[in-house]
Image: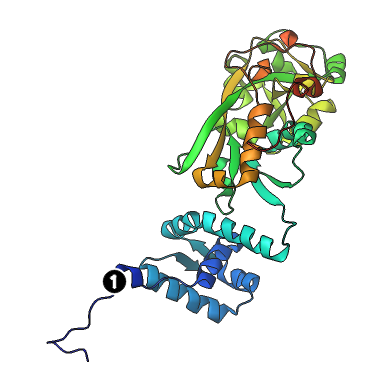
Amino acid sequence: MDTPEHPKPALPHTEMEVPDWNDLRLLNAVLRAGSLTRAARMVGQSQATASRQMDRLERIVGVKLLERSTSGAQLTRDGLALVEDLRSAWDILERAMARMHAPGRTRETAKLVTTDGVATYWIPRFLPFLKDSSIELRLFTAHEAGQDRHEHFDMSIHFMPPNDPNAVFVKLGMFHFLPYASADYLARHGTPRKAEDLAHHSLLDHAFYLIDKGTWKMRLPETGDDVRVSLFTNSSTVLVESARNGAGICWLPSYVSVFERNLVPLDLGLNLSTPIYLCHYRDSENNSAVRAVIHFLKHIFDRRKMPWLRDAFVPPSQFPPQTVESIMASYAPLQGG
């Protein structure tokens, strides 16, 4: 009996109440769905049950995890932090369940997120050299490093180093951006010889450049209001295809010259450089597929063989006459780490 003379002993730390796994799964679903009602449907619960689960979870952890409103539900900073801390546990559970459902045949997964330009125009050219058939590479795109916080990714390639203390990062190289136009566009509109000439051309712009490097007008202050941006997009694919089809002049990384002969780099004394980083979480290295893909990525961004990735700008006219195949020919099959 619990009496003043014989108080009930406090629970030791190891016996503290822990959240139910289904409650944590629901919290992650709220982040993905942006609504408690939609999250409840995702996990097969009624809205009333889901609401009770969130109340219980908030009571156990002792902080507010959701901001509820008529337009939906958003995770608080503490809620986001909790989901972030659990990302590795979810990934481990996912792999464990995959092994249970396909014993002896499980393909190890490695999840990579990067910009749509890198994902579309660089990595796919090398995928035939990723020889390990047991690896399933899950390749996703995001314009900004923070956009993918609602998903767990083993690795990311972005233009900014991470600010997460649990992340490991390595500089893969530098991207050097130059003005490019199609041969057809230049034949119809003439080739600009200096930066000021761009005031008389159609310019194509990307939302990423607005954030990271400034608009065309900011980069060409001497042209004033004469700069004409005819296309503004947040898609590297749209930007490249528009330039390829003669819509105008745009900034592209110099590696475009390695594989795209119809796009011509313009020597106007203009180039912009930005570092590019490979990031991963320390515990991701426990996954053999992740180790293999990290090894693969370091090879396909090899500054020794690829002058367009070096810190100092090398004009495309000085690139050696090599192809992706000839660059990779000297490598052993890219398996393991």
The amino acid marked with disc number 1 is Pro
Screen quadrant of the N terminus:
bottom left
Q: Is residue 80 left or right of residue 222?
A: left
From the viewer's perspective, is residue 157 above or below residue 154? above
Q: Residue at x 79, y 27 (%)?
A: 243
- Total numbered circles: 1
Q: Position of residue 137 (x, y in %)?
A: 71, 45
Q: Residue at x 52, y 66 (%)?
A: 27
Q: Is residue 41 left or right of residue 10?
A: right
Q: Secondary structure at mark 1?
A: loop
Q: Position of residue 44 (x, y in %)?
A: 64, 76
Can I make out residue 164 in this image?
Answer: yes
Q: Quadrant of residue 196?
A: top right
Along the line of sight, which residue is nearer the eye, 30 or 305?
305
From the viewer's perspective, is residue 233 above or below residue 187? below
Screen quadrant of the C terminus:
top right
Can I make out residue 213 in this image?
Answer: no
Q: Quadrant of residue 112?
A: top right
Q: Residue at x 73, y 58 (%)?
A: 104
Q: Is residue 30 left or right of residue 258?
A: left
Instruction: Specify the farthest residue to the bottom.
Output: 1
From the viewer's perspective, is residue 266 above or below residue 287? above
Instruction: Specify the farthest residue to the front.
Output: 104
Q: Which residue is mark 1?
A: 12
From the viewer's perspective, is residue 150 above or below residue 10? above
Along the line of sight, which residue is nearer the eye, 324 or 187?
324
Task: Please tell me how crowded label 1 is: few (under 14), some (14-19), or many (20+) other residues with Cα within 10 Å.
Answer: few
Q: Position of residue 215 (x, y in %)?
A: 61, 27
Model colouring: rainbow
Q: Position of residue 296 (x, y in %)?
A: 67, 33
